Amino acid sequence: MSARTSGRPGFLVYGLLAAFVLGSALPLYWSFVIGSHTKGEANDFPPPLVPGGHFLENARRVIDSVDFWQAMLNSLIVSTACGVAVVFFSTLAGYAFAKLTFRGSNLLMGFVVMTMAVPTQLAIVPLFILMRDYGLLDTLAAVALPTLVTAFGVFFMRQYLVDAVPTELIEAARMDGCTMLRTFWTVAVPAARPAMAILFLFTFMQVWTDYMWPLVALQETETLQIALDRLALTGQGQTTDYALVLAGAGMSTIPLLLLFVLAGRQLVTGIMQGAVKG
Amino acid sequence: MTNSTAPAGDAATATSPADGRPEPPGDRRRARAAGDRRLLRRQRRSRWDLKLSPYLYVSPFFVLFALVGLYPLLYTGFLSLFDWNRAYYVRGEFIGLDNYRFVLTDPVFRKALVNTFSIFLMSSVPQVVLAVAVAALLDNRLRGRTFWRMSVLLPFVVAPTAAVLIFGSLFADRYGMINQLLTEVGLEPIRWHVDRWWSHLAIAGMVNWRWTGYNALIFLAAMQAVPRDLYEAASLDGAGRIRQFFSVTLPMIRPTMIFVIITSTIGGLQIFTEPRLFDDTPNREGGPDHQYMTSTLYIYVKGIEDQFYGRASAAAWILFLIIVGIAALNFAITRFLTRRSVS
């Protein structure tokens, strides 16, 4: 804070931050340490503190116990589909709410904001019945359906587009004879791109990490989180096979870790932007 | 507007047909009338375009939300008023509020509700305090700013499923790392999976681990929006760093604090993955004696596993009302506080 008035922070600030970051990274490190030892070594005390050489062996055991690749592919399909749908519908609606005048827009936007506070996940029973009646149980479509739109997405895009697109530009496009859709496509979408990328990331992660709804909607088919759940059940026994379970936990985290390395900066920006405007 | 192909000019000429067909010589009046009609049609279409487009753009959200959000929620209310014949999957007779009566007097539901609030409090309070502290650290002119900001976010990319398995091994009752360390220093090992309040602490720990850095970034954004001259004025008045934090930073980020509390309330009261997977007994109902069963887990077990649709729906509506009530309360407080800080 007073760094604003004085100079750079001292050693203490870096030390405390480093301690927090190390503490945060520790559980993840632990999963890779245990996941790279044999079952016997993993249950030793004192436990191993550095990674061992059996990760590939454990990875093979994971792949043998659950259909890991298929599960990962399923997660990829569902998360991408939801990400694309949410971005598309939210940009359209967000643009309308931010830049177009129409009767009832305030009322409808108020409704969107309100639904952000509504815990719709609680309605699993009717959703389950709905999916069963339409024969969608145990399909990826059932997993994706409830997350094709999110109130947060509409809200987020609206907040972004209010400032990102100058109203004069829209008027100019209209003067030039652009249809509404063309104006949206040539004026709003290019300006919205950074926010669209961030919204895609968040939706992708949200669907990828979701456990409850796939658990309800799926039976034989597995997403990554469901596969991990089954793996945990296989790993249980007289002594839990932590080498297997934690190797699986680590493996399931790798894709998101990669995403984090590539796009972590955008995630940080997205969280901080959403906060200021939200 | 580089890719606009329409000729520049006023709206009327822009929307007039520019098909370039030569007008037939002779009856020019008729041709002009036809042109006018076409122009009129274009204009009318343009007006409809202007009027209808906004509704078309927002409609996918509302249609889909109605289908997968609103309808299931209302249907939950409907289901909660009926008896259910589990053997034939058919709706039984209307029984009014009997399901609610059952749920509210069910000791398991009451226990789950208490567990939910206990885990929520253990996770939200320390989380907000720690997140504000981390944000204050980040709100310095750090070297490698982006690196630090990304680093605190690391746990956020670990799915709750993976997180609970990792923490489950650390908190294992017999050979867990934490218990072995406790034994090493001469303390009694803790039965994390058996003892009710300790299990809540373990679960809250995982939740805190995943969300503290995320919330720290939100607080950081709020702190950076605090006008500098407030700090300068405080500094001139002789306030030290600590004093500045408590009398400038904290009051200024109060609206953000309430925003974070609202979102973590909505999420925290629906916690499911952690209590479900923390249970290492096969039935997975939040511990052998429901020590850490949460309300959402209750809904899942009653509704999906046991197929008591009516009771599960009643439980869902009760929880729904609790969450909305708390959110509304928070919202009212936010309005009140922000209005006061503006005036």
Image (cartoon, rainbow, N blue to C red):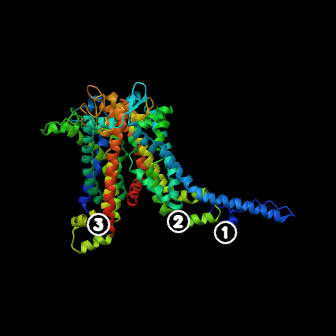
Depth check: give the residue in front, A254 or B200: B200
Establish whether labels 1 and 2 are both on one chain: no
**Residue closest to the far left:** B186
- Callout in the foreground (1, 2): 1
Q: Which residue is mark 2?
A: A166
- Image location of residue B307, percent across then percent down: 38, 30
Say which amino acid is labelled 2. Answer: Pro
In this rendering, the answer to whether A8 lies above or below B315 is below
Say which amino acid is labelled 1. Answer: Asp
In this rendering, the answer to whether B241 lies above or below B70 is below
Say which amino acid is labelled 3. Answer: Ala
Instruction: Determine crowd level at label 1: few under 14, some 14-19, many 20+ residues with C-alpha closer than 10 A.
Output: few
Residue at figure coordinates x 44%, y 37% from the top left: A127
Q: Say left or right for B131 vs B181.
A: right
Q: Chain of mark 3?
A: A
Q: Say left or right for B314 vs A131.
A: left
Report whether residue B216 is seen. Answer: no
Q: Chain of mark 2?
A: A
Instruction: Determine crowd level at label 2: few under 14, some 14-19, many 20+ residues with C-alpha closer than 10 A.
Output: some
Q: Which residue is mark 3?
A: A3
Q: Chain of mark 1?
A: B
**Residue closest to the far bottom:** B236
Rounded to the nearest angstrom, the CA distance separating label 3 from label 1 is 55 Å
Does label 3 or label 2 sit earlier along the sequence?
3
Depth check: give the residue in front, B72 or A42: B72
Q: Say left or right for A239 vs A54.
A: left
Rounded to the nearest angstrom, the CA distance separating label 3 from label 2 is 35 Å
Residue at figure coordinates x 55%, y 53% from the top left: B57
- Image location of residue B122, percent across then percent down: 24, 46
- Image location of residue B299, percent across then percent down: 34, 36
